[in-house]
Every structure is written in structure tokens, then in C-alpha cells.
Amino acid sequence: MNPLRVTIWHEYRHEHHNDKVAGIYPDGMHQALAAGLAPHGFDIKTATLDEPEHGLTQAVLDETDVLTWWGHIAHEEVSDEIVDRVQERVLNGMGLIVLHSGHLSKIFRRLMGTGCMLKWREADEKERIWVVDPAHPICAGLPEYIEMPEAEMYGEHFDIPPPDALVFVSWFEGGEVFRSGCCYQRGQGKVFYFRPGHETYPIFHMPIVHQVLANAINWARPVGNPPMVRGNIPQFMR
Ligand code: ZN
């Protein structure tokens, strides 16, 4: 079987303006993710906001089985035409993994149909990400919980539709909880939201995070059905 084709999409702005972020991700968060996911056997490409068509030409998307998405300060700079294109590919079977502040991206809000806002706080709080659906493929090989020594807090209420499967729930030192691993199907495509990934922590250098994301990419892979037949059709012949 050919390796899964993964495109890692990254806004790639903080690294240019924030020394702390540039120190953690000197080549950009997308390259850290690409390096971390490479041992899992994927055929990996990267794409960034400032490339022509945000690096997401129709040809790139047609050759992508699973797309990952990290954005934060420039969601509104993503063109609606590209959002339409990504949505169409998801509805036709491409997997989509939305990371951290991608909760407010145009594509995630479009696919969810809700506001997708939440509570947040930057106070270097400990986070425990509890596995609440251990039989789910995204939880394969994981311990009972994943601990982040320092994290940005995200708290409920998170304005999303009820997930088809909820695989992680986070606890934060400051008292809040959050639905940190949310699975959806949209059309023929699968969507996974994963909470960790604030830019001032080395989250995407963590092997356990690479394992979660590799599991999620494998879960979100297209099953390979032909395009669905819809519209006006003749009767079947007896
Ligand atoms: Zn953040």
C-alpha cells in the first residue's frame, strides 16, 4: 500500500515576529511536525499561508489524504476560495486534523457550523489530557493521561457541536476542563480537533504528541470509496 499523503498546513507568522516562538521552532512549527511525523511512514508535504494559494492548490489538495491545520493570528487572511476548496475535499473524503488555535479557523468554523469560541488563559499551567475513549484508534498505545508541564489553558464552554466521539478531556491546574480530542464526520471526510499546540511551548517536539497525531492521521485516512451518486437517477431495471 502506498504511504498516506499528509500535508501540514501552517500559518507561519509567529516565528517571524516572536523570538520565543522562533527559538522553539527555528524552521517553523510545520517543519517540527514534519520531522516528528516522518518516522511514522507518511509521505509528508508542508504548505504555508504566504505561499501562492496558501500552498493549497487544487493539485496539492487532490494529492492529500489528510491535511493538518494550525493557524492563530491570520485566520481572516485565508481566502474564502481556498476554504471552499478544502471543505469540498473534506466532504469528498480527505481527512482534516485541526490543531489548537485552529478552533477559530474559517475551515473549522465552516465545518462545525457553530462559533467555536472558548475560554483561555496564558499562565503556564499544568495540563493533564485524560484518555476517555481508550478503545478508539486515536488512543492506541497511549498511557492513561498525557501531561503537559506548562500549557495555555482552554476552558469550557467550547462552542462546538457534540462530537461523534470524544477521546480526550483536559484538566488544568487552574480548575477548568476542556474537550481536547473531538472526532467528527462531515460528508465522507473525518475531522479531528486536538487542543494542545500553543506556540510558546515545545508541544510539537513531543514524541507522545507525534504519536497522537499519527494515530489521528491514520484514523482520518480516506476509505477510498468512489464519488457518491446523487441527484435525479433512472429506476433500476428489474
Ligand atoms: Zn494558543
Image (tube, grey):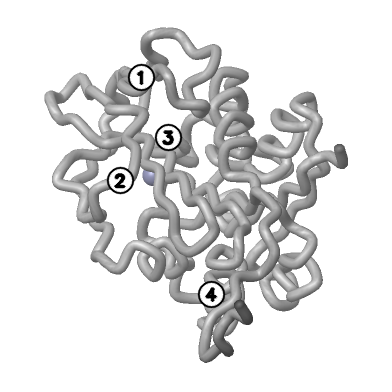
Where residue 39 sits in the image (x, y, percent)?
A: 79, 24
User: Does the Cβ of the disc 4 residue fall within 8 Å of ligand 1?
Assistant: no
* Image side of residue 11 versus residue 152, left or right: right
Mark 2 or mark 1: which comes first in sequence?
1
Where residue 137 sits in the image (x, y, percent)?
A: 52, 26
Distance CA(mark 1)–CA(mark 3): 14 Å
How many C-alpha atoms fall within 10 Å of the one at disc 4: few (<14), some, or many (≥20)?
some
The residue to which callout 2 is attached is 163
Q: Nearer the viewer, mark 4 or mark 1?
A: 1
Badge 2 amino acid? Pro
Where residue 34 sits in the image (x, y, percent)?
A: 73, 38
Mark 4 secondary-structure assignment: helix
Q: Nearer the viewer, residue 123 or 178?
A: 178
Circles 2 and 1, Cβ within 8 Å, touching? The answer is: no
What label does residue 196 carry, if any?
3
Q: Establish if 220 lies above or below 234.
A: above
Mark 3 or mark 2: which comes first in sequence?
2
Mark 1 secondary-structure assignment: strand
Q: Establish if 99 lies above or below 166.
A: below
What label does residue 83 carry, if any?
4
How many C-alpha atoms fall within 10 Å of the one at disc 3: few (<14), some, or many (≥20)?
many
Distance CA(mark 2)–CA(mark 1): 15 Å
Q: How many marks?
A: 4
Q: Establish if 156 lies above or below 230.
A: above
Distance CA(mark 4)–CA(mark 1): 31 Å
Badge 3 amino acid? Pro
Q: Nearer the viewer, mark 2 or mark 4?
A: 2
Q: Nearer the viewer, mark 4 or mark 3?
A: 4
Badge 4 amino acid? Val
Mark 2 secondary-structure assignment: loop
